[in-house]
Image (cartoon, grey):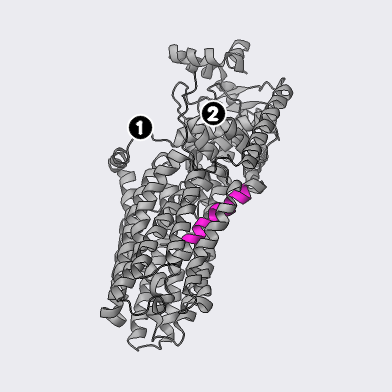
C-alpha cells in the first residue's frame, strides 16, 4: 500500500496541491507511482467480488502521468478494477454507434479481464500452477461479467431517446426507396433526365448535410442539431408532398437528401455518446435495421399509394414521421459528453447521466463523469484540422493502408450499383417480370433478412474474408443478371440474381466499409476518417443515381456490366492489398494495456462522507428537474433552437 503521506496527497482535499506538485516537480508522480507499484500487483482486489482495494489508471492527460485518473474537476479519482475496465472501454470504443462494433466491445472487455486476472495471480504466493490457472480463470470471468453488466441495464429515458433518434434513420431509408415505384404516376410525361435528377438530388444534398451536421452538432449540441434535422425533414417532406411540378420535386429531394446526410453523421454520434460502450454496437445495429426497414416500408406502401391520386400520400409519410419526432422532442436528452466537453462541472450533464444509467448516488455519477472525461480526452485530436489529421494518417504506413482501403471500399460500396437497385429496381424489372413492384418489395424484404444474417456473420468471419465473399458473390450475381436478360436463363433468374446480389452486399460491402473506420483506426482518428468517407460515399451515390437510367436505356441487358467491372477490381484489391481487419486480438490488447498501465497505484477509497454528499446532490438534481418542468409549462423550455451562450472556462 502507498504510505500515509502518499495517500494524503491523493485525497480530494489535497487534489489541487497534488496536481500542482506534478506540474512543478515531474519526478513526484513517478516516485509516487514507483512506491505503489508493488501494491498494484494484485490490484484485482478492487473488484466488488474479489476484495477491497482500489485501482487507478488513465490515458496521457495534460498535467497528469498515465497512471492516474481524474474527476471532472481535475482531482484524482478512485477506480475499482471493474471501473478501470470500463474506462478502457470508454477510451478504446469510439463514441459512435456503428453496425458490427460489438466485436470491438467484446475484445476490449476480454482483454482487460485477462489483464486484470493476470495481475491478481502474480500477487499470489505459494500457489501451484493449477491453482493459479483456476484463480486466473475465475477472476477473468468475474471481471468480464461485471464489465458486461451494462448490456443488461437499459433505462426508459435511454430507450425513448433511441427511438426518437432512430426515426431519423428510418426516414433516410424511406426516402432512399420512396422514388422507386411511382415514377410513372408522378407528373406523367416527365423526361428520363428530370426523374434521374430528382432521384440523384437526394445524393447531392447528402454530402452538404453530412458536413453541416457535424458542425451543428458541435455548435448547437447533439440534441439541438437533431431537432434541426427533424425540422429539415419536415420542410422537405411538405415541399415534396405538395409539389406542383418536377422542379419542386427536385428541390424537395435535395432538402431531404441534406437532412439524410445530416442524420447519417449525427445519429450514430448522438446514440454513441448516450449509450455505454457495451451498447454502442447494438445501437449501430438498430439504426441499420431502421434504415433497411424504411426502404421496405416504402416498397410496401407503394402498393396502395403509387397511383396518380395516391402518390402524395406516399411522400407525406416523411411529414408524419418528422411531426411525431417533434412531438416526442422532450424525450431527447442532450449528450452528456457534449455538455462535459463545454463544462466539466455541468450539473445538467450529471442529471442526464443519472437518468441514462439509472444511478442513485453522486459518487456513482461522478465516476461515470470521470469516464466520459477520460474517454473524451483519449479520443480527441486537439487543435488539429481535418487536413492536418489526414496528413498525419498518410505519413503513417499502417494508417495509410487503412485509409486507402477505407476510401476504396466506400467507393466500391456505391459504384457496385447497390443504389441502382434501391432507386430503380421497379423500372429495371419492368418487362422482366410480370409485377415489377412485387419484385422490388421482395428485394426490400430480402435486404432486411440479409442485414440480420450479416449480424450473425460479423463476429465469426474476418473482415477481409467477408469482403471477398461479398464482392465475389455480387460479381457472379451480376453475370447471372446479364445472362438472364440475354435469355440464356429465364427472366425469373434475373429476380433471383438481384436478391442474391443484395444478400452478398449486406454481408460485406454494406457494413464493413463503415466498420473499418470505427473499428480499425485509433479512436482519435475516427471522426476525421468518418467525415472523409461519408463525403466520398455520397459523391459516388450521386453518380449512380444520376447515370443508371441512362445505362439502363442504352446498355439494356448489359446495364450491370459496369458494376461487375467495379466488383472485379474490388475483389482483386481486397485479395492483394487489404489487410485482415477483423481487429486486434485480446492478447495483443492485453499486452498494450500492460504497457500503458505499468505504473499503477492502489488506493483505499474514502466514502465516509458519501451519505451527506449524496443528500445534497439529490436536492440539486430535484431542483434542476423542477426547473425544467416549470420551463415546459411556461413555454420557455429550450427545445434546441436557442443559441448556446458561451460559457467561461472553469477556474482551476
Which residue is under mark 2? Answer: 57
Q: On the picture, is 75 further left or further right than 521? A: right
Highlighted range, magenta: 158-172
Question: In the figure, residue 467 lies in which quadrant?
Answer: bottom left
Please state the horizontal and vertical placement of residue 94, each as a whole percent of the image.
48, 43
**Residue 555, quarter of the rendered image:** bottom left
Q: Answer above or below: position of 553 versus 63.
A: below
Q: Residue furthest left?
A: 554
Residue at 49 percent across and 73 percent down: it is: 299
Residue at 72%, 26% (x, y): give it.
615
- N-term mark: 1 or 2: 2
Q: Inspect this view and state whether residue 121 appears.
A: no
Q: Quadrant of residue 325?
A: bottom right
Number of other residues with Cα within 10 Å of mark 1, as a class: few under 14, some 14 to 19, many 20 or more: few
Image disc number at residue 383: 1
Toward the viewer: 301 or 446?
A: 301
Q: CA distance from mark 1 to mark 2?
A: 25 Å
> Which residue is pictured at 56% across the width and 16% down the height?
15
Q: Mark 2 and mark 1 in contact (Cβ < 8 Å)?
A: no
162 is higher (above) or lower (below) than 61:
below
Amino acid at each position: 500500500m502507498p504510505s500515509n503521506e502518499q495517500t494524503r496527497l491523493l485525497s480530494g482535499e489535497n487534489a489541487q496541491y497534488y496536481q500542482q506538485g506534478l506540474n512543478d516537480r515531474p519526478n513526484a508522480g513517478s516516485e509516487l507511482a514507483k512506491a505503489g507499484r508493488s501494491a498494484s500487483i494484485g490490484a484485482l482486489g478492487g473488484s466488488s467480488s474479489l476484495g477491497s482495494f482500489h485501482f487507478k489508471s488513465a490515458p496521457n492527460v495534460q498535467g497528469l502521468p498515465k497512471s492516474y485518473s481524474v474527476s471532472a474537476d481535475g482531482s484524482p479519482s478512485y477506480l475499482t478494477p471493474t471501473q478501470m475496465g470500463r474506462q478502457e472501454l470508454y477510451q478504446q470504443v469510439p463514441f459512435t454507434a456503428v453496425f458490427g462494433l460489438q466485436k470491438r466491445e467484446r475484445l476490449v472487455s476480454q482483454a482487460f479481464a485477462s489483464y486484470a486476472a493476470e495481475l491478481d495471480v502474480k500477487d499470489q504466493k505459494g500457489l501451484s500452477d493449477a491453482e493459479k490457472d483456476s484463480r486466473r480463470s475465475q477472476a477473468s470471468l468475474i471481471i468480464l461479467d461485471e464489465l458486461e453488466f451494462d448490456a443488461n441495464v437499459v433505462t426508459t429515458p435511454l430507450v425513448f431517446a433511441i427511438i426518437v433518434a432512430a426515426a431519423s434513420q428510418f426516414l433516410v431509408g424511406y426516402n432512399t426507396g420512396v422514388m422507386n415505384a411511382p415514377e410513372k404516376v408522378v407528373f406523367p410525361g416527365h423526361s428520363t433526365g428530370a426523374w434521374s435528377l430528382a432521384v440523384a438530388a437526394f445524393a447531392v444534398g447528402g454530402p452538404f448535410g453530412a458536413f453541416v451536421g457535424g458542425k451543428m452538432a458541435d455548435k448547437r449540441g447533439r440534441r439541438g442539431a437533431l431537432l434541426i434535422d427533424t425540422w429539415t425533414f419536415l420542410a422537405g417532406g411538405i415541399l415534396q408532398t405538395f409539389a406542383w411540378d418536377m422542379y419542386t420535386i427536385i428541390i424537395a429531394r435535395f432538402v431531404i437528401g441534406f437532412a439524410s446526410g445530416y442524420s447519417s453523421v449525427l445519429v450514430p454520434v448522438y446514440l454513441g455518446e448516450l449509450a455505454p460502450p457495451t451498447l454502442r454496437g447494438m445501437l449501430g445495429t438498430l439504426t441499420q435495421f431502421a434504415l433497411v426497414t424504411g426502404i421496405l416500408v416504402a416498397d410496401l406502401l407503394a402498393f396502395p399509394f403509387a397511383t396518380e391520386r395516391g402518390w402524395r400520400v406516399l411522400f407525406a409519410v416523411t411529414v408524419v414521421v418528422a411531426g411525431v419526432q417533434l412531438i416526442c422532442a422532450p424525450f431527447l436528452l442532450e449528450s452528456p459528453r457534449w455538455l462535459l466537453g463545454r463544462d466539466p462541472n455541468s450539473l445538467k450533464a450529471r442529471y442526464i447521466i443519472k437518468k441514462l444509467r439509472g444511478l442513485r448516488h453522486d459518487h456513482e455519477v461522478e465516476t461515470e463523469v470521470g469516464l466520459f472525461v477520460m474517454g473524451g480526452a483519449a479520443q480527441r485530436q486537439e487543435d488539429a484540422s481535418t487536413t492536418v489529421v489526414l496528413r498525419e494518417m498518410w505519413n503513417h504506413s499502417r494508417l495509410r493502408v487503412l485509409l486507402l482501403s477505407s476510401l476504396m471500399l466506400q467507393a466500391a460500396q456505391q459504384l457496385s450499383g447497390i443504389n441502382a437497385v434501391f432507386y430503380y429496381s421497379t423500372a429495371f424489372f419492368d418487362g422482366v417480370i410480370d409485377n415489377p413492384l412485387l419484385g422490388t418489395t421482395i428485394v426490400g424484404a430480402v435486404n432486411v433478412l440479409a442485414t440480420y444474417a450479416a449480424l450473425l456473420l460479423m463476429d465469426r468471419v474476418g473482415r477481409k474474408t467477408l469482403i471477398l465473399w461479398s464482392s465475389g458473390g455480387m460479381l457472379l450475381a451480376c453475370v447471372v443478371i446479364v445472362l438472364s436478360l440475354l435469355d440464356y436463363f429465364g427472366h425469373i433468374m434475373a429476380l433471383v440474381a438481384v436478391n442474391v446480389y443484395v444478400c452478398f452486399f449486406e454481408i460485406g460491402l454494406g457494413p464493413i466499409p463503415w466498420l473499418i473506420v470505427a473499428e480499425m483506426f485509433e479512436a482519435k482518428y475516427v471522426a476525421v476518417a468518418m467525415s472523409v468517407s461519408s463525403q466520398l460515399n455520397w459523391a459516388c451515390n450521386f453518380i449512380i443515381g444520376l447515370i443508371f437510367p441512362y445505362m439502363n436505356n442504352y446498355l439494356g441487358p448489359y446495364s450491370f456490366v459496369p458494376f461487375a467491372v467495379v466488383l472485379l477490381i474490388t475483389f482483386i484489391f481486397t485479395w492483394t492489398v487489404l489487410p485482415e481487419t477483423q481487429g486486434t486480438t485480446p492478447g495483443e490488447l492485453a499486452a498494450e494495456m500492460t504497457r500503458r498501465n505499468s505504473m499503477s497505484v492502489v488506493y483505499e477509497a474514502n466514502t465516509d462522507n458519501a451519505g451527506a454528499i449524496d443528500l445534497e446532490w439529490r436536492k440539486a438534481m430535484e431542483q434542476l428537474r423542477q426547473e425544467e418542468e416549470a420551463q415546459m409549462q411556461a413555454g420557455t423550455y429550450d427545445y434546441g433552437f436557442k443559441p448556446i451562450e458561451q460559457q467561461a472556462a472553469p477556474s482551476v
